[in-house]
Amino acid sequence: MFCNQCEQTQNGTGCTDVGVCGKDEDMQSLQEILLYGVKGMAAYAHHARRLGKTDENVNAFIEEALFSTVTNVNFDLESLLELVLECGRQNIRVMQMLDEGHTERFGTPEPTTVYEGTKAGPGILVTGHDMLDLSDLLEQTAGTGINVYTHGEMLPAHSYPGLKKHPHLAGHYGGPWQNQLWEFPMFSGPILGTTNCVLIPPDTYADRLFTNRVTAVPGGTRLKDSDFSAVIAKAKACPPLPENKVRESTIGFHHSVILGVAGQVVDAVKSGAIKRFYLIGGCDGAESGRNYYTQLAESSPSESIILTLGCGKYRIRNHDYGTVAGLPRLLDMGQCNDAYGAVQVALALSKAFDCGVNDLPLDIVLSWFEQKAVAVLLSLLALNVKGIRVGPVAPAFVSPNVFKILQDRFDLKIIEAAPPAELVQLGA
Ligand code: SF4
């Protein structure tokens, strides 16, 4: 039996005095925050490595961070907190590597109109985050008459020149990860799950669900490499998809695109045309309380710009926000790892206005569900960004004391029952 304080065995060869070692719930909480942050960062680092990007300092930090959680190594709150923030700093570097890996391999994203729905004929749906898998599949399906569709976090793929050049990258189908259970049964072709946030399939589509490498689910078929011939054969055997256009949308506001119009944005802020910026996004989920993000976006003033990323965008993208100062008010920056780009935009604005990021008229409101969101939040805290709202609730692994520390140092808040006036009214 393991002690729930420090994982030593109780009544055996290890600890017999539960809690005497000093590892209280706050140490446990900080260690868990660190572990979840490292897990999220490792996912991004894995994608970056597949694109040829690694950093020995990041690898060394991952070792150090994991070592610090070994039994009886670190019971010191301040040094654990510093490791937690260092995880955020290292994650900025990892997201930068992933951004560089994507742009060097597939070109710089550009604003792009995306067909949403299906086109008549056989098709394969790709979900997850690994654009290299999507690229390999597009190469292998070229000339076969099979269309390829994105789902969930794959939507930003349509904005990369090296991916959208394929005419059979036919469109986007569906929404965030939790919709898989009702969206996938209605897609008649095979589905490829490339990374996390793939759900265990019910019988309705288990025989059509493929995963690859580290991603695997009971009932699905796991491929060990990037040979997608089994997926292609399945697409040929499945009933064709119907012609069904749902709508068109515009994506592709990579940080380079926004920074390319930085002068226009700065002038608009100086003239008062733009008065506020929001970053609304992160990891979506199925729990109640997440309509807060929809309410916030839809109540935001018309003199504001909303940056979004991650699958949290699906909470706010079904609304026409119009334009401000010649720009769309809703700017989709990409996947959750494109939080790196949001940081670059915030830093550029603070430089343009000669102020700190915390002095900008910028509200950051994040949704979280899993480890990548933890890594992204730690990155923002490591940059000393204050006043971030997260929700819908505080994760169970954050102890009340640790949350109080984060509140005191970073003014971290949990989202309210509804967006308060101060968040949606100018001058409130
Ligand atoms: S944004 Fe988060 S919850 Fe959504 S698919 Fe990506 S990792 Fe999963």
Image: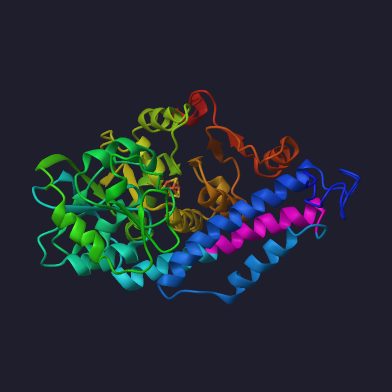
Please tell me whether residue 75 belongs to the stretch shown in magenta.
Answer: yes
Residue 195 figure quarter: bottom left
Residue occupying the point 87% across, 54% down: 14
Query: Is 314 rendered above or below residue 45?
Result: above
Q: Count the labels in the image.
A: 0
In this rendering, position of residue 131 left or right of residue 49 = left
> What span is colored magenta in the figure?
74-92
Q: Position of residue 10 (x, y in %)?
A: 84, 47
Depth check, front residue: 39 or 222: 222
Q: Position of residue 56 (x, y in %)?
A: 58, 76
Q: Is residue 313 visible?
A: yes
Please tell me whether residue 64 belongs to the stretch shown in magenta.
Answer: no
Here the colouring is: rainbow
Query: Is 180 rendered above or below residue 261?
Result: above
Depth check, front residue: 246 or 302: 246
In this rendering, position of residue 387 left or right of residue 99 = right
Q: Position of residue 334 (x, y in %)?
A: 36, 53
Query: Is the stretch drawn in magenta largely helix, strand or loop?
Result: helix
In this rendering, position of residue 375 left or right of residue 398 = left
Query: Is 50 rendered above or below residue 293?
Result: below
Q: Position of residue 235 (x, y in %)?
A: 18, 55
Q: Is residue 323 visible?
A: no
Residue 76 figure quarter: bottom right
In this rendering, position of residue 65 left or right of residue 126 = right
